[in-house]
């Protein structure tokens, strides 16, 4: 199948996996899946699966990386070698470095780092199964893991992405839609204020399409946020 | 792996417990933690397994690539094992190139499988001298609470025994089950408080001394041995743990076979 041959939607406006244009894939989240970690989360997002672990706050060493006024976040995003159809050679690559950095930038915007001067908080994100949209999966799981570790935050970052395929704006592209699509707009949203801490985009969107994708994302973020809160409630009980 | 600080208190505590024939978590000398095995848990891998032993959790994924056979072995494919211990699995594991510990784990697991002969590399041939399957076994640690060797070895053999060769994807015929003729199983023992125990947890590992890994095949034959870390042991000690390994490996083999049967 060449580019342009892929039909993402039937005449009734239903996508290949049965969703409507503004519908997300099903999301499941579970906290505390890594017994030895200070905080952890497992997320299943469509066929994507990721785990996130938080260790710390702990002493930051070597000392030259310490900040006298705040903690540093040490964020790593990685894809397991068996997470994709073609095996990934282990080790960092440019893509995972960039995603690690933008994830750190997003999470540092909400974590109360000033509470822990000279220390380090490690955030580890591992993609176990990949099926388009892993960075959103990772950021969302990391937020839950940070909350699970009891790290004070002003809000949890919810990351979602809308995109475009066959000229139609679609929420949460799956693998073929992502492969044959024309645009992708991942965002990191703070659901309490609808502020953004993470934003990327590639492809081609008109201003109207862009606005629609943006609105889809804000709506979806609130849906995912409810699932994140449920997962934390399930582990700790009570109201959050 | 960062060098952990081992308080002498922990060592003393373990020695006192050992003198009373007790362990930190209440187990007897040769009893293992509860084991859960799940197969086909990774949908992008051609074979996969998740093993949980107490709070130790690992994954194994099998992938296939097409390789050109070596000129001196034109009809043979290959098996490659890699254990990449990501810092997600515990506070002492650090990022960076594979550590000595993870390389040792990968190689010891690999030897047990390779030397048992359960994978006949001649059966991996597609076109002599031109194409053969390379089986890639990736070991991934989710949570390290000790004895990752056994967890990895168990996940590895269960993943291999349930792997499907993706011939259709590579356009070389129909998919088929990877032929695996045997179920090598590893049993590991750590010297804790002056005596060997089976399936040490993280605290026993940290406060203990040397460790011994034994991989046994279907007939009870030995296929790989490894002594790790600082410490000495006697022939009597070795005989004792070897006798226990024979029993333990048979039990675990049974577990793997029952799981395959229920698939």
Image: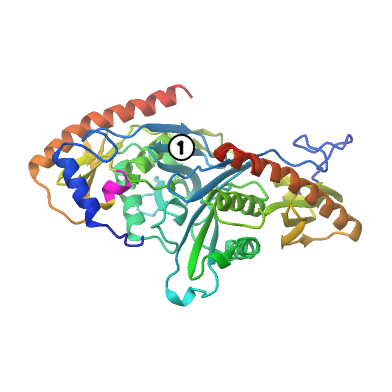
**Position of the N terminus of chain B by quadrant:** bottom left
Q: Which span of residues is magenta-colored?
A: B201-205
Q: Magenta stretch: residue A143 in it?
A: no
Residue A179 placed where, x, y %? 72, 51
Q: Mark 1 points at which residue?
A: B49
Residue A108 is at least partly visible in this image: yes
Tell me which residue sits at (64%, 65%) in the image.
Answer: A105
Tell me which residue sits at (28%, 52%) in the image.
Answer: B206
Residue B242 found in image quarter: top left
Residue B207 placed where, x, y %? 24, 51
**Dot 1 crowding, Cα within 10 Å, few <14, some 14–19, many 20+:** many
Tell me which residue sits at (84%, 51%) in the image.
Answer: A215
Closer-to-camera residue (B45/B97)? B97
Above or below, B28 relative to A52: above
Residue B160 placed where, x, y %? 42, 37
Residue A93 found in image quarter: bottom right
Q: Is A103 situated left or right of B16 in this image?
A: right
Tell me which residue sits at (20%, 37%) in the image.
Answer: B22
| Rendering colour mode | rainbow
Describe the element under mark 1 as helix, strand or loop. Answer: strand
Closer-to-camera residue (B109/B180)? B109
Residue found farthest to the right: A208
Subunit of label 1 = B
Q: Is A96 situated left or right of B117 in this image?
A: right
Above or below, B150 relative to B177: below
Q: Is B58 situated left or right of A5 in this image?
A: left
Residue A48 placed where, x, y %? 62, 44
Above or below, A219 relative to A121: above
């Amino acid at each position: 199948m060449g580019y342009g041959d892929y039909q993402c939607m039937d005449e009734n406006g239903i996508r290949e996996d049965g969703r409507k244009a503004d519908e997300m894939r099903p999301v499941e989240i579970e906290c505390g899946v890594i017994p030895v970690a200070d905080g952890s989360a497992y997320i299943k997002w469509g066929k994507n699966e990721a785990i996130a672990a938080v260790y710390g706050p702990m002493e930051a060493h070597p000392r030259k990386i310490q900040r006298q006024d705040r903690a540093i976040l040490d964020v790593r995003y990685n894809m397991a070698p068996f997470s994709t159809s073609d095996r990934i050679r282990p080790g960092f690559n440019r893509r995972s470095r960039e995603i690690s950095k933008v994830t750190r930038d997003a999470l540092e915007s909400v974590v109360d780092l000033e509470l822990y001067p000279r220390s380090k908080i490690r955030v580890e994100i591992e993609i176990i199964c990949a099926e388009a949209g892993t960075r959103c999966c990772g950021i969302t799981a990391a937020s839950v893991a940070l909350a699970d570790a009891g790290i004070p935050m002003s809000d949890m970052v919810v990351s979602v992405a809308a995109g475009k395929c066959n000229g139609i704006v679609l929420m949460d592209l799956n693998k073929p839609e992502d492969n044959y699509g024309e645009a992708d707009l991942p965002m990191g949203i703070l659901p309490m204020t609808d502020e953004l801490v993470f934003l990327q985009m590639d492809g081609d969107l008109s201003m109207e399409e862009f606005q629609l994708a943006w609105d889809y994302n804000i709506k979806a973020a609130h849906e995912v946020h409810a699932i994140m809160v449920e997962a934390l409630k399930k582990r700790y009980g009570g109201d959050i | 792996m960062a060098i952990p600080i081992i308080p002498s208190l922990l060592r003393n505590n373990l020695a006192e417990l050992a003198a009373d024939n007790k362990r930190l978590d209440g187990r007897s000398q040769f009893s293992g933690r509860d084991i859960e095995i799940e197969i086909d848990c990774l949908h992008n891998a051609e074979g996969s397994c998740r093993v949980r032993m107490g709070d130790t959790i690992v994954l194994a994924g099998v992938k296939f690539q097409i390789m050109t056979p070596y000129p001196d072995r034109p009809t043979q494919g290959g098996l490659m094992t890699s254990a990449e211990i990501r810092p997600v699995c515990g506070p002492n594991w650090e990022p960076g190139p594979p550590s000595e510990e993870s390389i040792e784990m990968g190689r010891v697991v690999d030897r047990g499988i390779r030397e048992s002969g359960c994978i006949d590399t001649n059966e991996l041939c597609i076109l002599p001298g031109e194409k053969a399957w390379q089986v890639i076994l990736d070991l991934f640690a989710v949570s390290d609470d000790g004895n990752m060797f056994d967890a990895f070895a168990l996940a590895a053999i269960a993943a291999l025994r349930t792997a499907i060769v993706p011939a259709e994807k590579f356009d070389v015929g129909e998919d088929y089950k990877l032929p695996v003729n045997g179920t090598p199983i590893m049993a590991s023992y750590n010297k804790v408080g002056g005596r060997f125990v089976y399936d040490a947890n993280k605290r026993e590992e940290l406060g203990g001394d040397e460790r011994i890994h034994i991989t046994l095949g279907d007939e009870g034959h030995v296929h790989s041995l490894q002594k790790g870390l600082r410490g000495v042991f006697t022939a009597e000690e070795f005989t004792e743990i070897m006798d226990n390994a024979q029993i333990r490996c048979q039990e675990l083999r049974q577990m793997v076979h029952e799981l395959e049967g229920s698939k």
